[in-house]
Image (tube, rainbow, N blue to C red):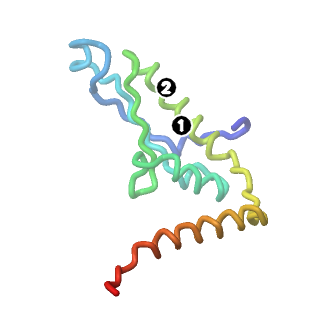
Amino acid sequence: MPGFEIPDDALEERFITGGGPGGQNVNKVATTVQLRVDLFRLGLPPHAYRKIRELAGSRLTSGNQIVIQASRFRTQEANRQDARERLAEMIAKAHQRDARRIATKPGKAAKARRVDSKKARSTVKQGRGKVSMD
């Protein structure tokens, strides 16, 4: 969302060795970034806070932190930028409000169709009754 600043004290970065492109260099250099974001320090409005928790899914820890791991690129800086962009996209999505659902009632024709199908099903089931030997 334009105009929303992510406070630096809400972010914590760690660089770890990880898989991905880079060959044997991957085992030597810690290029994968693990970005931890404290949700309370972001200062989100209530609707955005609820939505971001939903969007985070399994990336949300029990301590209300979102963990974003980026290892697509071979350099720390590119992975750091990637992680921050993914966080910004998630926050922008969280600020979008869902359209309000307007409850509607079924029309007369729909009610009639429903009753007709119930009657048809009823006659099918009545035909399955026990056969009497008279």
Cα distance in 3D space between marks 1 and 2: 9 Å
- Residue 92 position in % (x across, y down): 64, 39
Q: Residues within 10 Å of mark 2 (few under 14, many from 20)?
A: some
Give the structural element (helix, strand or loop) at label 1: helix
Residue at (22% x, 18% y) in the render: 28
Depth check, front residue: 5 or 2: 2
Left/right placement of residue 62 relative to residue 7 reads left
Q: Which mark is residue 82?
A: 2
Q: On the picture, is 78 further left or further right than 97?
A: left
* Residue that extends furthest to the front in the rendered view of this protein: 134
Q: Earlier in the sequence, mark 1 or mark 2?
A: 2
The residue lying furthest to the bottom in this view is 134
**Looking at the rendering, in which quadrant would you find the N terminus?**
top right
Residue 25, position as x, y percentages in the image: 25, 13
Residue at 55% x, 40% y is: 8
Q: Is residue 130 above or below residue 25?
A: below
In the depicted structure, whether residue 16 falls above or below residue 104: above
Residue 6 falls in image quadrant:
top right
Q: Which mark is residue 87?
A: 1
Q: Residue at x 62, y 46 (%)?
A: 94
Q: Nearer the viewer, residue 45 or 98?
A: 98
Amino acid type of the residue tagged 2 in the rendering: Asp
Given contact means CB atoms under 8 Å apart, are the residues at marks 1 and 2 in contact? no
Task: Name the secondary structure under disc 2.
Answer: helix
The crowd level at tag 1 (other Cα within 10 Å; few <14, some 14-19, many 20+) is: many
Task: Residue 18 in the image: state x and y as whole percent.
Answer: 28, 26
Residue located at (63% from left, 52% from top): 48
Which amino acid, mark 1?
A: Leu
Task: Find residue 114 and report its horizontal and vertical position in percent.
Answer: 65, 66
- Which label was assigned to residue 38? none
Q: Nearer the viewer, residue 74 or 129?
A: 129
